[in-house]
């Protein structure tokens, strides 16, 4: 099970693209409403979540995904239930994936990137405390997956599929959406 956390002001493409690609790969991916069941992205697009934060069964999580966007990222980081869930997934050795501002603000802010390679939205690298920042669309370092932003959303989604289903399935999904992975 993959849980994609949505808070008011999230970046729409960074949330929907990974969910779409994961579902195409046969992965059960749920959008979780952190700030309500109808969550509006940073461009005013309303998305109805699959379930509210208080109904998530974290024992079923294989991966947690943190979209970027402002103020979505800061809204996620300000929510103690979110940071507790991220910490629990990280400590349990589950995948933690973040894109755009989320690697810097959330993962960096929580100290989860120390000694790791990662990427984030350009100009936010200082927030990735202890990380080795890479100028790539997507970086996989163990069970931490980071991406640069909207432009890297397809690479990010394919990396999530690869992590959970293998590289061959990720290639099939990429081909189905006519994407040539550039990571």
Image (cartoon, helix red, strand yellow):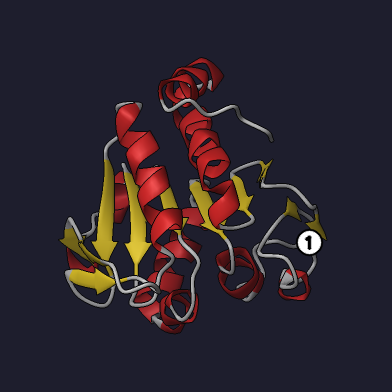
Residue lying farthest bottom? 78
Q: To which quarter of the image does residue 105 belong?
A: bottom right
Quarter of the figure with the N terminus: top left
Please tell me which residue is depicted at 59% across the width and 69% down the height of the picture: 101
Q: Position of residue 182 (x, y in %)?
A: 67, 33
Quarter of the figure with the C terminus: top right
- Residue 106 placement, left or right of 89: right
Tally the marks.
Answer: 1
- Residue 32 placement, left or right of 124: left
Please tell me which residue is depicted at 35% across the width and 62% down the height of the picture: 5
- Residue 139 placement, left or right of 117: left
Is the residue marked by circle 1 packed among few (<14), some (14-19), or many (20+) residues within 10 Å? many
Q: Secondary structure at mark 1?
A: loop
Q: Is residue 56 above or below residue 172?
A: below
- Give the labeled residue for mark 1: 131
Q: Position of residue 40 (x, y in %)?
A: 28, 73
Of residues 23 and 82, the one drawn nearer to the viewer in this rendering: 23
Please tell me which residue is depicted at 64% across the width and 56% down the height of the picture: 148
Please tell me which residue is depicted at 52% across the width and 15% down the height of the picture: 168
Q: To which quarter of the image does residue 103 belong?
A: bottom right
- Residue 140 placement, left or right of 79: right
Q: Position of residue 154 (x, y in %)?
A: 51, 41
Q: Position of residue 60 (x, y in %)?
A: 29, 45
Of residues 10 and 143, the one drawn nearer to the viewer in this rendering: 10
């Amino acid at each position: 099970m993959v849980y994609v956390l949505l808070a008011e002001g999230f970046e729409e493409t960074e949330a929907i693209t990974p969910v779409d690609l994961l579902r195409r790969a046969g992965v059960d991916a749920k959008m979780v409403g952190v700030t309500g069941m109808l969550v509006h992205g940073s461009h005013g697009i309303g998305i109805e979540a699959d379930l509210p934060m208080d109904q998530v069964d974290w024992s079923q999580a294989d991966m947690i995904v943190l979209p970027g966007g402002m103020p979505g990222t800061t809204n996620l980081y300000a929510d103690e239930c979110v940071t507790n869930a991220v910490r629990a997934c990280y400590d349990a050795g589950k995948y933690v994936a973040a894109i755009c501002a989320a690697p810097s603000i959330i993962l960096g802010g929580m100290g989860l990137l120390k000694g790791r390679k990662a990427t984030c939205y350009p100009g936010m690298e200082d927030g990735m405390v202890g990380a080795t920042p890479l100028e790539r669309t997507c970086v996989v370092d163990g069970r931490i997956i980071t991406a640069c932003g909207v432009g890297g959303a397809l690479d990010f989604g394919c990396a999530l599929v690869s992590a959970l289903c293998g590289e061959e399935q990720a290639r099939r999904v990429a081909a189905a959406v006519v994407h040539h992975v550039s990571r």
